[in-house]
Amino acid sequence: MAFNHYLNFNGTNLPLPDTYDVDMIDVLTDASGETEAGTRQRDIVRTGMYSISVSFSVSSKWLKILTEYKQLKSMTVTFFDPHTLEVKEAEMFIEGYKVSLVKDTSCLGLWKVSFVLNEF
């Protein structure tokens, strides 16, 4: 049984993630919020933008590759959308990049890498 590739950055399949959470968010204007009368107002600029929180346990080789992707201003991301059970593609960027050492090994360690992908 073959594993699905949940994420692909610029044509490169990433390893199977430890966690994979896909959110669809709405972008609201500054005028959104509570009115003086106490009612809520939502001025939506854009609906259904993808935000993907993901974490990996990776070798030093993949740590270097993921760090290089972090430096890019944007990239084409192909991802599995659990809302529609389809593969989608979007222009995204990495935010909140975090790296921590899980275990020291003879091959420069096992690393936990986590970040959020946000759609443009």
Image: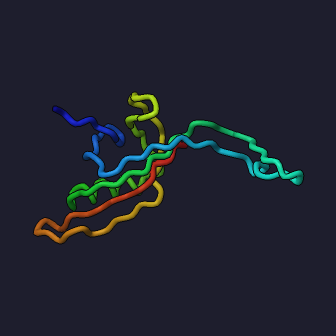
In this rendering, position of residue 43 left or right of residue 118: right
Q: Is residue 105 left or right of residue 84?
A: left
Quadrant in which residue 68 is drawn: bottom left
Relative image position of residue 14 (x, y in whole percent): 28, 45
Q: Position of residue 92 (x, y in %)?
A: 47, 44
**Residue nearest the observer in this picture, 46 or 34:** 34
Q: Residue furthest left?
A: 106
Q: Is residue 88 above or below residue 62?
A: above
Residue plotted at (26% across, 45% down):
16
In the image: residue 28, left or right of residue 22:
right
Q: Residue furthest right?
A: 37
The residue at 25%/46% (across/down) is: 15
Residue 46, quarter of picture: top right
Q: Quadrant of the N terminus?
A: top left
Q: Position of residue 52 (x, y in %)?
A: 45, 46
Q: Residue at x 40, y 56 (%)?
A: 70
Q: Nearer the viewer, residue 6 or 60?
A: 6
